[in-house]
Image (spheres, helix red, strand yellow):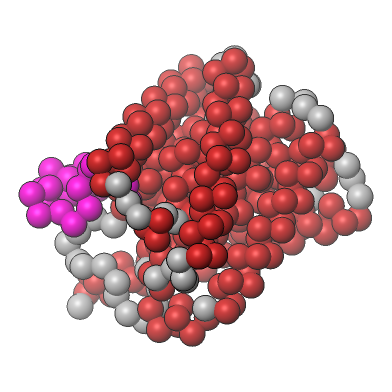
Amino acid sequence: MKDQEKPGQLQVQLFGAALGLAGLMLAWQHAEIAFVVAPSPVPETLLAVAFFVSTLVFILYTKSAIDHRPRAETPLGTPPTLVALASGSMALMQLSAGVVVLLPLWQPASSALWLVGVGGYFVCAALFWVAVGRVRPTLDAVTPAWFIPTVGMAVAPSAGVALGFTSLAAGMAIVGTVAWFALLPVVAWRLVSQGPLASPMLPSLCVLIAPAALISSAIRTFDGPSDAATLFFYVSVAFALLVLVMLVARRSDIRDVGFSFAWWSATFPLAALAGAAQLTLAAAPTAGHLLAAQMSLGLASMVTAVIGVMTLRLIIRRRWR
């Protein structure tokens, strides 16, 4: 395993850890509602871990930005950093959804957390497109990670509706859906026409799974047309299979590059897929949906656990070498 990041510099990919853990927590909550798993302390544990990781990452990022900004490789105004910060804002919105369900007496705190996440997301999204306009990237610079500061706002209904911000959450879900339809052809054309992604960027392929899953869950949250929600879930499953094929085809490149924190970008898309699967099962309890709910939750949990262990190993190696 090769170290891809330099010690002493903050790795903004770790914002994906906060988002992935928060998404997995919500997937387990939905699984209990759909009776895929029995009530357990798992969601509460994941909420606590996600809060701890989110707080730690934000603190470390702030400290690193203060200490190393003059020589940082990814300054605040660059698209990669803004993508990561948008992930952190999405994590706050997801965490507020967990607080609403698990700690209902903390609703004022949850509302504040959600609003901070929404505000942070809008700032990151605006700065992202300003940076894109300034840099004027070529088509080969486009990656699926661009969905994060655009379509990622579709996570808003997960807590926004329960907190009473229905109109704002609905607007964000609609804009996120439109952004997905607008950006998807660009990303698809880049993947088809510009050659394969560089090996270190392969984890970003997993982001392709998330948008349709988020839209499916948003439709369920608003009690929208069940057929439409189910269709978007199926689209997300199709993207998951496509991503699996692409990653298997590049397995030698993945092996050569080794593990990096960028693999956290695979966790939230799988958690979003698992969450959408639980809601689909609850709305249409069929044997196929049950199998999809069980498999997606198991896969998301396993991948998150493996990446978590590998992250700890990498951090320990750097600490003691």
Q: Which x, y percent locates residue 141?
A: 37, 57
Q: Which x, y percent locates residue 190?
A: 48, 59
Q: Is residue 290 above or below residue 126?
A: below
Residue at image position (78%, 44%) is: 231
Left or right, 48 with reference to 283: left
Does residue 210 appear in the picture of this structure?
A: yes
Was residue 98 drawn as part of the magenta stretch in this picture? no
* Dominant SS in magenta: helix
- Camera-side residue: 254 or 108? 254
Was residue 56 drawn as part of the magenta stretch in this picture? yes
- Camera-side residue: 124 or 300? 124
- Give the magenta range: 52-80
Residue at image position (45%, 81%) is: 253
Residue at image position (30%, 39%) is: 133
Q: Is residue 65 above or below residue 295?
A: above
Q: Which x, y percent locates residue 265?
A: 47, 57
Residue at image position (30%, 67%) is: 315
